[in-house]
Image (tube, rainbow, N blue to C red):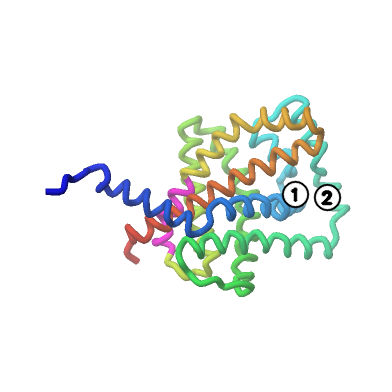
Amino acid sequence: MRPRFPIRDSPLVEIGQASFARLVAIQFVDRAIALGSLAFTALVPLLLIAAAYIPGADGLASELIDRFHLTGPTAAAVDQLFAQPDDVQQAISWIGVLVLVGASLSFTRGLQRIYEAAWRLPSRGWRGSRAGLEWIGGIVLWTTVFASARTWLIDRTGPVGTLVVLLGGNALLWVWSPYVLLARRLPWRTLVPSGLVTSLAMTAYSIGSVVYMPGAIDQSASRYGSIGIAIALVSWLVGLGFALTASAGIGAVLGERYPRPA
């Protein structure tokens, strides 16, 4: 009689094996690095412009300083590197905006391909641009509005409330994101496991960033100057790409294994 190994037969191990196979199939490492690079060249300038025009926003430099709890010379270097809202408004042109939107769509296509590969859906190619534009508009609004609301809630709820706000907000965002980017080809309930996994990963990454990034930015800026801040941000965004890509693959496996009824 062949011996049984309960650990090997457990659902957790099966999910782990299926998730690893899915990540290999979607070329996890290559897609994560590409996504992080695209985020730096597309989303950072887009958020810089959005912060300059949306009422109540203090600018991208202030957002980065607050997010990473930067102080002293490091905060001053970040503030100097990124233009202030008034300077951005004076420098931007319609041609620049169009070029920037085109660059941003390259990021959305990269994220779309990750979700399509994770869920084994056919690629829509350029037909997915409309969904990409919808996602860009939503993410700009979310980044500015939710950031202000999050700060207000955190000031009134303490550490436990902060964690609840981060988890809940991220879960909503990362159920909505694949739903839009996949052009609503999957019901949103099917994407709930993916949203929850991504929320956990992004919240953990956000908390870890507060601990790691101030020292990383300070060290990189001391060694390379202003360009060192950009290097640190690229590294952070690549790590974000790994978190998103891994969550997409694992979330797709969980969504297929435990489908939620409509």
In the rendered image, residue 48, in percent from the top left (x then y), is placed at 75, 49
Is residue 15 rendered to the left or right of residue 200?
A: left
In the rendered image, residue 240, in percent from the top left (x then y), is placed at 59, 46
Corner quadrant of residue 256: bottom left
Q: Which residues are magenta?
A: 188-199
Corner quadrant of residue 74: top right
Q: Amino acid at mark 2?
A: Val
Report the Cα–Cα distance between label 2 and label 1: 8 Å
Q: Which residue is mark 1?
A: 48
Q: Which residue is mark 2?
A: 88
In the rendered image, residue 169, in percent from the top left (x then y), is placed at 51, 47
Q: Main secondary structure of the magenta part?
A: helix
Which residue ends up furthest to the bottom in the rendered image? 127
What residue lies at 52% left-to-right and 44% top-to-bottom? 202
Q: Are marks 2 and 1 in contact (CB under 8 Å)?
A: yes
Q: Earlier in the sequence, mark 2 or mark 1?
A: 1
Look at the image and say whether residue 189 sits in the magenta stretch. Answer: yes
Q: Amino acid at mark 1?
A: Leu
Look at the image and say whether residue 32 sits in the magenta stretch. Answer: no
Which residue ends up furthest to the top in the rendered image? 72
What residue lies at 80% left-to-right and 46% top-to-bottom? 85
**Is 50 placed above or below 189 here?**
above
Which residue ends up furthest to the front in the rendered image? 1
Quarter of the picture holding the C terminus: bottom left
**Is 60 placed above or below 181 here?**
above
Q: What element does badge 2 sit on?
A: helix
**Residue density around tag 2, few if under 14, some if 14–19, many if 20 or more, within 10 Å:** some
